[in-house]
Image (cartoon, grey):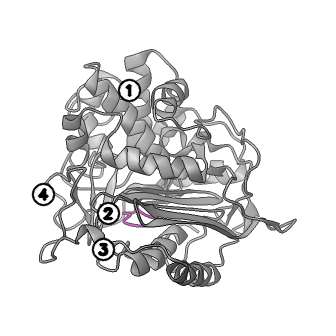
Amino acid sequence: MTTRWRRAAVGAAAVGLVVAPLGAQAGYAQAGYPGAGYPGAGSVAPSLAASAVEAPPGEAPPAPDDFPRLTPAVAAQLDEAVKKAMAEAKVPGVMVALSAPGKGEYVRSFGVADKATNAPMATDLYMRIGSVTKTFTVTAVLQLVDEGKVRLDDPIGTYVDGVPNGDRITLRELAGMRSGLFNYSADESFYKALTSDPQKVFTPQELLAYSFKHPVLFEPDAEFLYCNTNLILLGLVVEKATGQKLEDYINREVVAAAGLKHTLFPTGAEFPSPHAHGYTDQTASGKTEDATNWNPSWGWAAGAMISDLPDMRSWAKTLATGTLLEPATQAERLKVVPALPGTGYGLGIFNVQGWIGHNGSLPGYGSLVVYMPQTQATMVVLLNTDIGYEGSEPSTLFGEAITKIVTPGHVYTLPAQPVTGK
């Protein structure tokens, strides 16, 4: 998730303070910020089939062979681009995986996993994935839709009491970031509580209380606004509909069902080894600190999960092609509304210039997990900092640098957004 405490990103990624998606700052609207909606957000773009993504207006769709072979020469270009992005954004360490059928693969790690010891970053380390967690939570909801246990157009008030406009906000609007609810991670008192005690355990009800003390920002479905509150509510829907803890359901019915071996929804601050240390400036002092062992409970259904590079490579395709869902349900998921120029958001998933998936960030970590259906290409970037670069999530910088080389007609770009509350 792109989870900057006080910035809500569209999609991807992140956990706003808590997971902000779409490159964590990528495509985010600050809760309460004037004009937080996006031009054209009221219209729905055609659904994106798993086999073909429509090109932006006026642009011809790319040919299937547009993705290059990942030759040593191309790998050298990618090495240079990644190292340049690291230097520009002052990223301690990063791992990158890029592949497509018949084109080879590029799997690398750069920099350090621990600044104290200079231990090198490696491609087999566990990482916190922030708002990519949203893709798992929404997948769980959509599985329940397939089973007839919930409906996308059910009002959230059917499952959770006390939600402002709860009789009119639907599960579809929560998953699509169109509820109008205030983003709890943008609340000043929440920020202070978290940064003053990073080990604090937050309950879902406490997180919702930070949101519900604020007035709603707009009527249901009137605008798009990335909001972690939406995912907390969807996590509670899963628990109400199944009678199980969210982490238990996701670990069994989503993670295990997808064949992921090193992905988990933690119950506390546990972090399997080996893992990279993560560094953040979202701190009480404003200075950069090691956030490796911070408790991710504040992100919960919006950004608490952990994974590794191989699993995220697998998940990128599963997510974009709908392996765990009925085709009709996946089609609903991939109906996008405009979020930022060149970017649309569906149900817990985004489309950035044809790259489908999510980004994420939470204190200390950033992630980008995407798939391009036309070329069947997968791109995953995992890094051990969430410190922004010129208003954007650092994962966006890497995504842009990589795609300029391999898919110049479909460059992963997310406009820089103002960062507040730092």
Pointer 1 or 2: first along the chain: 1
Residue lying farthest right?
Answer: 117
Sooner in the amino-acid sequence: mark 3 or mark 2: 3
Highlighted magenta segment, given as a residue range: 20-30
Q: Earlier in the sequence, mark 3 or mark 4?
A: 4
* Cα–Cα span, label 3 and label 2: 7 Å
Residue that carries the numbered disc 3 in the rendered image: 66
| Disc 3 element | helix
* Residue type at the position of mark 3: Asp
Is 74 left, or right, of 238 in this rendering?
Answer: right
Which badge, 2 or 4, is on the more N-terminal residue? 4
Q: Taking 313 as reference, is 377 left or right?
A: left
Q: Is residue 86 left or right of residue 196?
A: left
Q: Nearer the viewer, mark 1 or mark 3?
A: 3
Type of amino acid under label 4: Ser
Amino acid at the residue labelled 1 = Val
Residue 395 is marked as: none
Real-space Cα distance between discs 3 and 4? 30 Å
Residue placed under numbered mark 2 in the picture: 375
Contact (CB < 8 A) between labels 1 and 3?
A: no
Q: Nearer the viewer, residue 169 or 378?
A: 378
Reading the image, the residue beneath label 4 is 43
Name the one closer to the observer, 43 or 53.
53
User: Residue 276, image x and y in percent?
Assistant: 73, 56
Examine the rendering and report whether any part of residue 155 can be seen. Answer: yes
Q: Label 2, label 4: how many angstroms apart (C-alpha)?
A: 27 Å
> Can residue 214 be seen by looking at this rendering?
no
Q: Name the residue located 74 percent from the left edge and 48 percent from the top edge.
A: 293
Is 27 one of the magenta-colored residues? yes
Q: Locate residue 333: give its quadrant.
A: top left
Residue 165, percent across and down? 26, 36
Residue behind mark 1? 237
